[in-house]
Structure formats: structure tokens, C-alpha cells
Amino acid sequence: MKIAKEILEGRALTPEKALDLLVNPSYDTMDLVHEAYQLRKHYYGHKVKLNMILNAKSGICPEDCGYCGQSREMKEKQRYALISEDEITEGARVAAENEIGTYCIVMSGRGPSDKEIDHITSSVERIKAAHPQLKVCACLGLTNETQAEKLKAAGVDRYNHNLNTSENYHHEVVTTHTYEDRVNTIEIMKQNNISPCSGVICGMGESNQDIVDMAFALKEIDADSIPVNFLHPIKGTKFGSMDQLTPTRCLRILALFRLVNPTKEIRIAGGREVNLRSLQATALMVANSIFVGDYLITGGQPNQLDYEMIQDMGYEIDYGTACESEVLS
Ligand code: SF4
């Protein structure tokens, strides 16, 4: 295979070729990883970006996302209203202490109220004053133009809003908002010079073609940062007993996302530990970014294991540069 070489020479992968690479067993998984690694090394060397999530508001959500333990179907799960500004800023202090490049403030719900936006922006102003090197990503749901302007003015660097799945499969995942709603929020952020972060969740029953479509949709949207989640099934959710993924399948998916989006920050996100298992380090040959610590309502592995993994691979932490190359303004 000379796929990476061709991509570096400007010949982008076609959707047809991408599908073939994903499904054709004559392409060995480690050969695909090797091709993806050429691109990862070319654009990011041996650097790893670290991100940390704060779940600032949990549960109490009217939406019906089939993968989510905070949806309206999951009333017994952990739930709390928006936490205080002090707690949000304290989380940033912990992130800065742990060499985190990007601190991600996440809220459950369809989208923030104006009062919640004011609470978040005030917190972000405090964070930026105390830790100017720390990039801040907000993940607050569907937003409007005015809210985006306020987030930008407060210093929010990045906004996460995942496509989650393909346009074709979206109706199987959620019925209370549309694929277009999601795309619109990402476009609003781009228009306000906030770096767009958008990714997917694999393993929810989607087809191989859906996975290819997701990778190309993110290319089309021009997401700077692409979190690739692997479903960690939560009992009681629509996909609570889904079991589609193997560690090598996850590697093939990650390699595909890198080959389609060679220059982008590709993050191994939720479900990393349970789905990749002993191949987490191999996955870092493709991805250049991980979350450290816990996810929204599922636990991650102890931080120390992540730092050891990075060190064992001879990689180094890339702090403080999380959004610089991608800023749109
Ligand atoms: S993913 Fe977000 S919008 Fe969907 S149910 Fe969960 S908290 Fe609500």
C-alpha cells in the first residue's frame, strides 16, 4: 500500500476506496495503521494532545439520544443542575495541574438557556484570567448566533458538537432533533471564529457505508478536532446491549478517519478503554489526542496509566497548542 504517500502528494482518498479499505480483509489492519501512522507522524510527530471533561450539568435532558445515559429515558441516572462557577473554575485548575491542553465544559440538554450561557461565559472569563494557556472547549448542545457571540467574547476557543452518526442513520439514534440541527450549530461556531470540534460514536448499529459517510461529512464540515467515540453500552439505553466492536475493528475505523482527515486532531474518545483494551497504545499511532480522566457518566482509566502509555511509546505531551493551527480568524 502507498496510500499515505498518495495522500501527502495531494491525491485524497475517495469514498469508494475508503469503504474498500474498511471492509476488505485483504487489507491487513496493521498495514492500515501503518499508513495512517505516516500521516499522523507527518502532521503531529510524536505529540499527544490531552483533553479533560467536566460534566457541568448532568441528566435532566428532554432529548432521546439512544446511546446516552442522560436522556429522558434514563431518569434513575446521576443527575444534577448546572454546577457553580467556583466548581467549573476549580476543574480548570486541576486540568492545568495535569498538563491538559484543552478543558472541555459539557452540559447535558438540548441547548443552553441564556442564563446558563451567562454562567458559562463568566466561568470561562475567570478560567482564562487564571490559566491563559489552557484552551477551553464548550459542549452545550444546540446554540444560536447570539450565544455563540457571547462564548467567543468570553474566550471560548473551541465548541464541540458531534455529528454522532451519518445523516442516513441519524433517525435511528435520536428523534428529538435532526442531523441538520447539529450541522447548523457547527456552522454557527465557524461563523463566529470558534474552532469546530465534531465527531462520531461508532458501534451503534450503523453500516460500514455509514462510517465512511461520517468520515467524509466531517471532512466536508472541516472540523478541526474529531473525537471518535466507541460505544460503551449503558444499560437501559436503546443501544444498551449493542456489541459490534472489536479492538481491531476500532483500529480500522480510526485509520479510516485519519486517512480521510489527515491533518486533523483525531481523538480517541469515550469507550477507548473498554473497546480498544490492550490496543490503546497502537491506536495512538493513528490518533494524536485523548481524553484523560473520566467521561460524562462512565469512568476512564486512572490518569497515571495514560501518562505511562504516552511515555512508553516515546511520545510527548502537546500542551497549550490545542487549537492554534486551526483557528479560523
Ligand atoms: S447526548 Fe446530550 S442531548 Fe442527547 S440525551 Fe444525552 S445529554 Fe441529552
Image (cartoon, rainbow, N blue to C red):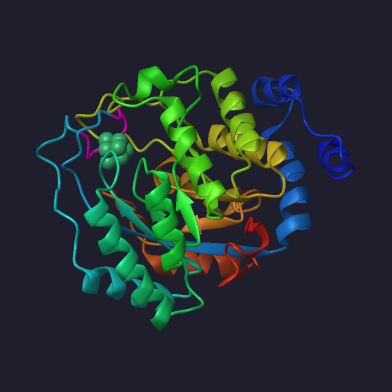
Relative side of 313 to 95, left or right: right
Point 60% across, 30% down: residue: 217
Point 39% across, 72% down: residue: 95
Let me know if residue 69 is in the magenta part: yes
Most extreme residue toward the right is 9
Can you tell which quarter of the image residue 70 is in?
top left
Q: Position of residue 236 (x, y in %)?
A: 19, 29
Rendered view: 26 above or below 228? above
Rendered view: 206 above or below 230? above
Q: Main secondary structure of the magenta part?
A: loop
Please state the extent of the stretch shown in magenta in the rendering.
65-71
Q: Position of residue 97 (x, y in %)?
A: 41, 79
Q: Quadrant of the C terminus?
A: bottom right
Relative side of 60 to 94, left or right: left
Most extreme residue toward the bottom is 130
Rendered view: 163 above or below 114? above
